[in-house]
Image (cartoon, rainbow, N blue to C red):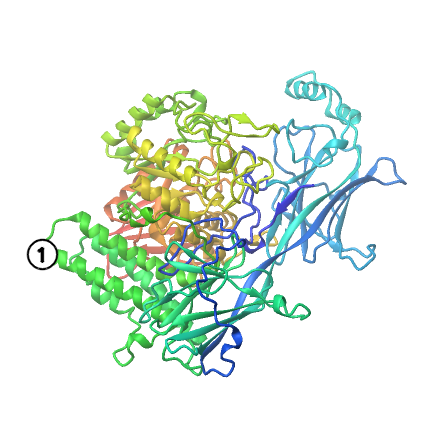
Amino acid sequence: MSIVRWRPLLHNPPIENRRFPPIRSEPSRSISTRRSIKNSSKFSFKSSHLELLPVIRANLAQTPPLSEAPDAEISFTETFQLKRTQSVEGKVTVRLHQQEEQGSKWELVVGCNLEGKWILHWGVTYCDDSGSEWDQAPLEMRPPDSVPFKDYAIETPLKKSSSVSGGEILYELKIDVDGGSTIAAIHFVLKEEETGAWFQHKGRDFRVPLTNFLEENDDNILGRKNLNVWPGALGQISSLLLKPEGSPPEKELVQNSKITGFCEEYTILKEEQVQNSMTVTVKKSNEANKNLLHFDTDIPGNVVVHWGVCRNNNKHWEVPSKPHPPSTKILRRKALQTLLQRSFELQPKADVIGSWGLFPVDKEFSGVLFVLKLSEYAWLNNSGTDFYIPITSVSSSQPQITRDQAANEQLRSTELHDNVDKITSDARNESPEVNIAEELGSTSPVSPEKPEATQTGHAAFTDEIINEIRNLVTDISSERDKGTKSKEAQENILQEIEKLAAEAYSIFRSSAPTFVEESVSDTDQLKPTVQICSGTGSGYEILCQGFNWESHKSGRWYSELKSKASELSSLGFTTIWLPPPTESVSPEGYMPKDLYNLNSRYGSLEELKDLVQNFHDVGIKVLGDVVLNHRCAHYKNSNGIWNLFGGHLNWDDRAVVADDPHFQGKGNKSSGDHFHAAPNIDHSQDFVRKDLKEWLCWLRKEVGYDGWRLDFVRGFWGGYVKDYLEASEPYFAVGEYWDSLSYTYGEMDHNQDAHRQRIIDWINATNGTAGAFDVTTKGVLHTALEKCEYWRLSDQKQKPPGVVGWWPSRAVTFIENHDTGSTQGHWRFPSGKEMQGYAYILTHPGTPAVFYDHIFSHYKQEISKLISVRHRAKIHCRSVVKIMKAERDVYAAEVGDKVAVKIGPGYYEPSGPRKWNLAAEGNDYKVWEAL
C-alpha cells in the first residue's frame, strides 16, 4: 500500500500545464504541502522536533491544586474559540476488471470511502504518442456528467454507490474500456471539490496501463505486479518506435499486448477543520503575591501550553519565577512548556475528554502570553498573534475588541505596510519633499485621550510596532539633519522599518495559526545579529535569467554566455541568474550530488569564476541557483536504498527526512513538501544547517556570487532560509515558491488572494530576507491575455492581483522561465502575447525577470525599449500603481508620476494636465512617458 499525506487546507488545483502536475520533466514534485509554521509576535522560534513525552519536569514545589481556592475571587475569564485540523483516514480503490458478458470490454472503477464531493481529473495517452502529455478520452469512454477540462483532460464526478452494505460510504466512478483500442494508459488524479485539494500517487498522476508500453522504473504504474510483460519487449518496442520507416503499425503491437485485471487500495489522509475552545480564568491565590491561571480546553489528546509572562503590557516574553506547574520544561530561557493534565485521568468514567492546568503567576507581572502546541507541527495561536491574558487590574467585564475594531486594526496595519513601503522608497531616492513623520502619522491609532496602556489585543501590539518605527524614523531624520553621508547607516534603519511593517502586516495576513521552534545554544543566543540586505537589492534590479532548459547541451554554456555580458549590460540588465553549478545526476543541474564539485555540464569551476568576474566587470550582479531541498546520494544502505552521501559533505541517513517512504531517512519529519525523485534533506539537523551555511559562504567567496535563486523552497520551512541568508549575506535572494492558482470547474477564479497569501506566508517565514517569484501575477496574466479578460488585472481593492499588489518589494515578476518556456513548455505563456506581458511587468513595481530565450529573439528591441523606459522613469520595486482601466478588452495604469501603460486590443489614451509622449508600442500594447 502507498500512504499519501493530503493537505487540503492549501486548496491546490492542478498546475497550469498539460501533464499534472510536474513543473520540470524530471520526476514530479509533490503538490501536497505543509502549512508554513510561524509566530507573528515579537517572540518566535525556528524549527525543532520536540516530543510531547517524556517531559522534563521542573516543579520544585507542588503546584496548588484546583480546589485550593474554590470560592476565590475571579478577576478575569475569557473563552477563546479554536479552529484546528484533524486527519481522517480513508482508502482510494482502483480496480480494472473484465466485463463477463463481453470479452473485449473492460471496466475501470475508481472509488473513495471518505465523505466529500469527489471529482476524477483524467485523460489518456496513446501507443503512438512518444510524449507524456495527456489527451482527452474519446466520447464513447466518457461517463455521464463528464466535463472537458481545457483541451487535454476530462473531469467526472464520483457518485455515492448504493451497492455497499454495512453503512460504509463509498463514492465511485466507472469508465468503460475497449481492450482493442490504441489507448496505452489512463491517467488520473482525484480532487475534493469543496476544499480544492488534490490526491495524487507519489506526487504524480495515477497511471492505469492498458498495454505493455511501460517505462522502466516508473513506480507510478498501477497493477505493475500483474502485468504480463514479454522478455525483451521494452527494447523491441523502443526500437520499433524509433524507426522512421518500415515499422509495423501500432495496431499490431496492441493486439499482442495483454490487459491484466487488478485491484489495489491506497491510504488517504484527509484533514478536516474542527472547532474547540480554551477557557482561561484568573483567580486570586491564597498566597498574597500570587495569581492562579486555570486553563480548561476540550481539545482531545496531549495539549502543551507554550507560555511566558510580561510586564507593563509590553508583551515581551519572560520566564516566570519558580515554582512551575508539573510537567513543565524551560525552553531557551525564554518560555515554559507545560503539558496540561488530561480530564479523563481524573474522571476515568466521564464522557468529557479534554485537558486542564493550574498555573501560579507572581502579581508583579501584568500579563501572560501563550500559544498551544498540539503535536510536532500543529500549533494554535490567536488569529496570527499570541494569546494574551491580563492578570493585574482586570475584571471579567472588561470590554473585548469587537469585530469592527479588528477590521479597523487590519486596515491600519495594511495601510502601515503600504506607507512604509512608500516611505522607504522615497527615503532611498533622497526625495527632498518626503516627510516620514507626517506619513506615519496617518497610521497612528492612539489618541491623546486614550493612554496606550489601556490598549488590548491587536491594537496594542501594532501600536508598539508603530512606536518602534517612529523611533527609527527619528534616527534616520537625525542622521540627515547632521548631514551624515553614511548611506549604509540609513539603509540599515530603513531595513528595520520594513521588517517591523512586515511584522504588523503579518498579524492579519497570517492564515496558519502556527509556528515552530528550534533548540539553540546559549552561546548562539549571545551572538550579535548580522546586518543583511533586505532581499530586494537596491530596488531597481532588472533580472535576466541567463539560461534555458537546453543550455547544458553544448557543455560550454559559461563560455557562450561570457560573450554576451557586455550586450546584456547595454540592454539595461542589473542582475543575472545563472544555472545550478554543482555536479548533478540530471544534466540540467537540479538533482545535485557533490555540492563542492562545481564541474557541471555548463562548464568548469574556472570557467564559472571567469564568467562571474566578467559580469562584475560590466556592472552586473550574479545570482547562483542553489538546490537546498534535496540531494542525490552516492551509496545505498543495507536495504538497497540510496540515502548515504559522499564527497565533501559525506552525510549519513540522519540527513534525510523520516517521512518520505522512498528513502528510509532517520532524520525528523519534513517541514515542507516532498520531492520524491531524490532524498529530501532534513534541515532541522544542526550539522546539515552548519554544512549548508559553510557551503553558501564558500560559494560567495570562491565563485563570487552576489545572491541566490533558491530552488523548490516549498520543501522546507522558510525560517531555515532566513538562517542561511543571514549566514551568507546575499545582495539579492529570490525563492521558487510555486503552487497552483484557484480554479472552479476549470475556470480561474478572479480572487486569487489565497494563492498569493501562501507566497506571502513563505516570505514572512524568511522574515522578509528573500523575495519570491510572483507566480500569481503570471497566472492571472495567462488567463487575462488568452481569454481577453483584462478585468482580471485588478483585484477587489483596485490593486494588482498578484504578490506585487500586496508586497511589491518582495515580488519577482516574470512571464516565462526554463520550466515554462524553452523545450519544457510547461504552462507556456500565450503565444503572440509575450510583449503584452513584458509591457506589464517592466512598467510595474516588483523586480521584473526576463527570460533568456526572449532576450535573444525578435523581441529584443521591444524589450530593450521597455527597459529603457523603466530606467528613465526610475520605476522601482515599490513604485505606486494607479489602475485607470480594467475592462474586458483593455487594462491601463499609471505608474508613479511618469509612466502610463495600456495592454489589450481596447482603447486607452492617458489624459489630464500632463503631456504624454508615446515611448514604446507593439502588438496590443502602448507605453507613454510624461513630459
Mark 1 crowd level (few <14, some 14–19, many ≥20, 10 Å Cα): few
For image coordinates 50% across by 83% down, the residue present is 71
- Viewer-proximal residue, 581 or 283? 283
Q: Which residue is mark 1?
A: 482
Identify which amino acid the numbered label 1 is placed on: Lys
Residue 364 occupies quadrant = bottom left
- Viewer-proximal residue, 309 or 871? 309
Q: How many marks?
A: 1
Q: Is residue 692 visible?
A: yes
Against 49, residue 818 (above or below) is: above
Residue 497 is left or right of residue 105, and the answer is: left
Against 429, residue 668 (above or below) is: above
Q: Is residue 182 visible?
A: no
Residue 685 occupies quadrant = top left
Residue 405 is situated, as x and y percent measured from the top left of the image, at 40, 75
Identify the element where label 1 is drawn.
loop
Residue 673 is left or right of residue 155, and the answer is: left
